[in-house]
Image (spheres, rainbow, N blue to C red):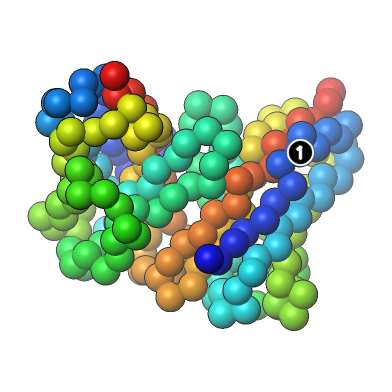
Amino acid sequence: ETGVTQTPRHLVMGMTNKKSLKCEQHLGHNAMYWYKQSAKKPLELMFVYNFKEQTENNSVPSRFSPECPNSSHLFLHLHTLQPEDSALYLCASSPTGFGEQFFGPGTRLTVL
Amino acid sequence: QKEVEQNSGPLSVPEGAIASLNCTYSDRGSQSFFWYRQYSGKSPELIMFIYSNGDKEDGRFTAQLNKASQYVSLLIRDSQPSDSATYLCAVNEDNQFYFGTGTSLTVIP
């Protein structure tokens, strides 16, 4: 198991629900990331935080809202999602914004 | 649109053979290159990274980078059934990471 943890591991939600995904890294890294992984598609980078500051937002719909209260914690707040948002959501951390990334186990999200 | 291309496979090799995985990328500005292994139902785990042209070896794994031809490859020597997984290639440019769709490798005992 890596030094990056994610909760919950599985989540089923309706389109009108609000939920949050949590990520925590115990590696002392300065950068954290949210990715979406859908079947047959490449990993899609959603958000990047360096030293708690958001540095990238890759045209992600506003129904996904990230929050980084400190360099060890990262949240992804979800509201009014669509069924096509069902995917594996992965959190990763990196010592810097350019180097190797370490992934958490992911949250398998299903939107009904 | 920056692209990272990988043959989706499946690639099958017998146990003990060398598995060769290839990746091409579209942007010459790419600065660093990574190989991840992803078992079914699991998250990606880092195998190797390479920044400079040439070869980099780590145990049974060798990463090869050719920036002029814009490809990066991963060789797995003495392949084992436990190497059966999907291998993801990733490139970094200006704090952006781009992933390929992955190559599925099966090592046959």
Residue A107 appears in the rendering: no
Please give left or right for residue B94 compared with residue B47 in the image.
Answer: left
- The image shows residue A46, relative to residue B32, as above or below, that is above
The x and y percentages for residue B38 are 57, 38
In front of the other: B55 or A13: A13
Q: For mark 1, what is the residue?
A: B9
Would residue B86 be visible to someone looking at this image? yes
- Please indicate whether residue A18 sits to the left or right of residue A95 in the image: left
The answer to whether A89 is drawn above or below residue B51 in the figure is above
The chain letter for the residue carrying disc 1 is B
Give how far across and how far down residue A3 sits, in percent: 34, 44
Residue at 22%, 65% (x, y): give it: A54
Label 1 SS: loop
Residue at horizontal 52 percent and vertical 33 percent from the top? A39
Number of marks in the image? 1
Residue A76 coordinates in the image, percent (x, y): 21, 43
Identified by mark 1, the residue type is Gly
Residue sitting at x 10%, y 55%: A69
